[in-house]
Image (cartoon, rainbow, N blue to C red):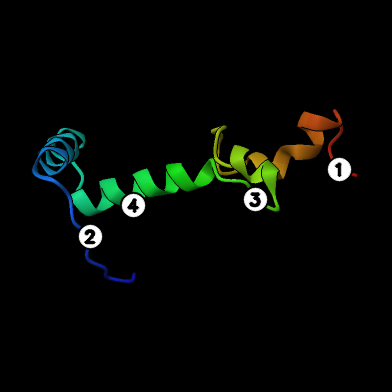
Amino acid sequence: MIRTQISFDDDLYQKAKRVAKQKGISLSELCRRGLAAFLAKEPTQKPWMAYAGLLQGRKDDSASIDSVVYDREAP
């Protein structure tokens, strides 16, 4: 982690602290998540990355990709 210092006006700071508390996370984590969400919308050389992490699955899903996608046990 890199440590940095940022400034907020009082209203933004109080709202952010309240949301962080409601979510059970630190203000730093809320800022990281917000910045990550903002940056994910920026143009990139890999536009498909905007969809990374949208779907959820099981840990072993990649082991069964052949049966799921190709309806067979192995290539």
Q: Nearer the viewer, mark 4 or mark 3?
A: 3
Residue wearing tag 2: 6
Q: Nearer the viewer, mark 1 or mark 4?
A: 4
Point 13% across, 38% down: residue: 21
Label 3: how many residues lie within 10 Å, few (<14), some (14-19) or many (20+)? few
Q: In whole angstroms, how far apart are the C-alphas of marks 1 and 2?
A: 52 Å
Q: Earlier in the sequence, mark 4 or mark 2?
A: 2
Residue 51 percent location from the top left of the image: 61, 37
Nearer-N-terminus badge (3/2): 2
Q: In whole angstroms, how far apart are the C-alphas of marks 4 and 2?
A: 12 Å
Vertical arrangement, residue 3 with respect to residue 59, above or below = below
- Rendered residue at 34%/69% (across/down): 1
Q: Which residue is mark 1?
A: 74
Comparing 9 with 45, the one in front is 9
Q: Which mark is residue 44?
A: 3
**Disc 3 and disc 2 in contact, CB within 8 angstroms:** no
Q: Nearer the viewer, mark 1 or mark 2?
A: 2
In the rendered image of this protein, does residue 42 appear above or below residue 70? below
* Between discs 1 and 4, the one toward the N terminus: 4
Residue at (60, 40) in percent of width and height: 50
Residue density around tag 1, few if under 14, some if 14–19, many if 20 or more, within 10 Å: few
Residue ID for mark 4: 32
Which is more toward the observer, 41 or 50? 41
Which is more toward the observer, 42 or 9? Answer: 9
